Each structure stands twice: as structure tokens, then as C-alpha cells.
Amino acid sequence: MAGGEGRVCDIRYHTAVIIDGHTHIFPPDVGERRDEYLRRDAGFREIYSRPEARIATADELLASMDGAGIDASVACGFGWSDAELCRSHSEYLLEVASASGGRIIPFCTIQPADGDARDDLKRYAVRGARGLGELRPAQQGYSLIDSPEANLLAWAADAYDLAVLFHASEPVGHVYPGKTGLPVDQLGRFVSDFPGVAVIAAHWGGGLPFYALMPEMRSALDRTYFDTAATGFIYSPEIYARVIDLIGADKIIFGSDFPLIPQERALKELRDVPLDETARRLIEGENVRDLLRLPAP
């Protein structure tokens, strides 16, 4: 269980396990040489060119988890355009996950257009990756519609029992750094074309849950989960009740988007939402634990 007992008593009052399904950490070198990485990758530049955009390491994530009373966190890679940057980031995630005693759950990142991506996927799966993400197809330069990259991702998910976490962009509303990444129509097409793939659609899937009112999409979303990362930046709290009504609490995963949002704050925001105990338990950890086949705490 996580440390920080003084705060755990305040936060963990009815949940067997608390898992943050969406965090970001980088190798220390990225923060130390930020300007170099800004020059190398347009997607990274869009999000991290502002000095206030935090870049966290594994040690900072673990300290945050101790303070917030979180048992485990999914640590996502970044959707780099350069395959070598994807590889170095993924290697870091696998190393720190191995050293964390199960507290950090690695989601590796790949450039699926790269010729060695298939070998990378096998290596990551063997070393303990539980998923891929956070992938940003629009920024990485590929489509999820009728493409070899989409076929590769679906193959890997099936072959290695990996979840695929996509950044998803809502097509309306205010503009913010990092909003671009994957148009919701491409996400909808991917889950329709590959219904057996376990997909985690970040940031409430760019609004995709609302298309569950269409019978064909309700069926297509059977293996799709939606995380709550950065909810307060995008939606009002009523989104929980609306999405639960449409697809059920068993398809929602708590995510903070740390370090953009402090984990303790994200968990408090979730705790302020009126939910029944079953829904709360599922969202706070049981859904992602079952999806990723994680051991019980």
C-alpha cells in the first residue's frame, strides 16, 4: 500500500485500491535539456514550450502517490514522432516500473510507422509493459483509418494483451496546449474496426461516450474505457453522471494527468462528485485493475 499514512486516512475511506490510470513521467534528461527536445519534436513543443509546463520524473511521481494515498499509477510515455525518442522513453518507463515494486505500471510509447516497431512491441511486452500510450496519431503523423499503423496497434494489443491509450481531442470548445492528438471520428472508427482491442480513450474520449446513443456505437464501445484525466480543464462535474448513464461506471477510469494536475487535487475533485459506493470503487481503481489484470493489493 502507498505511504503517507497521515493523508491516506483522510482520502481512503471506502476503496480497496486506488489507481491513477493516467500520469506522465520523463527521463531526467528531458527536463534537464528541455530546449533540445523542444527543437526535436513539434508535439512536445506544443505542450512543453511554456516554462510552467511541468516535466516530472519517476521519483516525483512516487512522492506524489505517497502524499495522495494512491497505490499505483499508470505512467505513460509521450507520442514522439522520432522512433528513437519513443524507445529511450519506453526503456526508462520499464526500468523505473521494475524498481517500483508494482507501484508504477508502464505504458510504453512507439512510433508505429517505424520499421522496427514490431520488434519494439515484443520487447516491451516481455519486459512487463501493460499498455501503449499516450499515443497521439495526429501529431505522430499517422491515421487510425485503414492504415498499417492501426493494424499494427490492433495486432499488438491482441498478441501481447496490451491496452492502447489514445489522447482524444474534443472537436469543439476552447483551445489549449496539447488539445490536438486524435480527432474523435478516427477514434470512433478504430474501436469499430477493432472491437476486440482494449482501448483507453483519454480525457473522456473527446466526447465519444455521447455517441453511445447510436446503437452501432454502443456496441462498438464494448471494450472502450474512458479516463477522467484533466476533467476540470474541459468539463463540468456533471459529466460523471451523464457518462455513467450512457455506458456505465464500469467503463470509467480515474486519471489525474499528473503532473499537469496534482494527484491529490484530482482525487479530491473526484471525491466531490456524488457517486454511489459501487461506482466510486470501480472508477477509483477496480476498473483499471481488472482491465490490466493487476494483482489484488
Image (cartoon, rainbow, N blue to C red):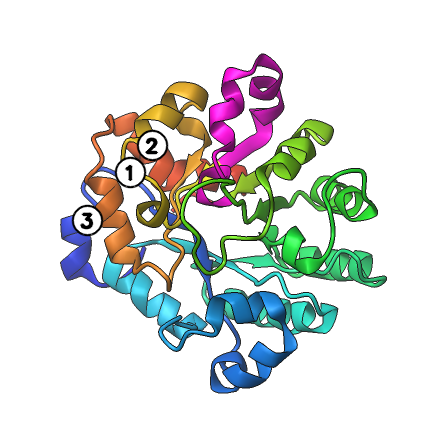
Counting other residues with Cα less than 10 Å from the Cα at mark 2, is it few (<14), some (14-19), or many (20 or more)? some
Q: Which residue has dot 1 on it?
A: 236
Tell me the element at label 2. Answer: helix
Q: Which residue has dot 2 on it?
A: 239
Q: Are marks 1 and 2 in contact (CB under 8 Å)?
A: yes
Image point (29%, 51%), residue name: 266
| Rendered location of residue 288, percent (x, y) | 46, 41
Residue 5 can be seen, yes or no: yes
Amino acid carrying label 1: it is: Ser
- Is residue 5 placed above or below 225 in the rendered structure? below
Quadrant of the drawing holding the N terminus: bottom left
Amino acid carrying label 3: it is: Ile
Q: Are marks 3 and 2 in contact (CB under 8 Å)?
A: no
| Rendered location of residue 30, percent (x, y) | 53, 79
**The stretch drawn in magenta includes residue 49:** no
Segment colored magenta: 202-225
Q: Which residue has dot 3 on it?
A: 11
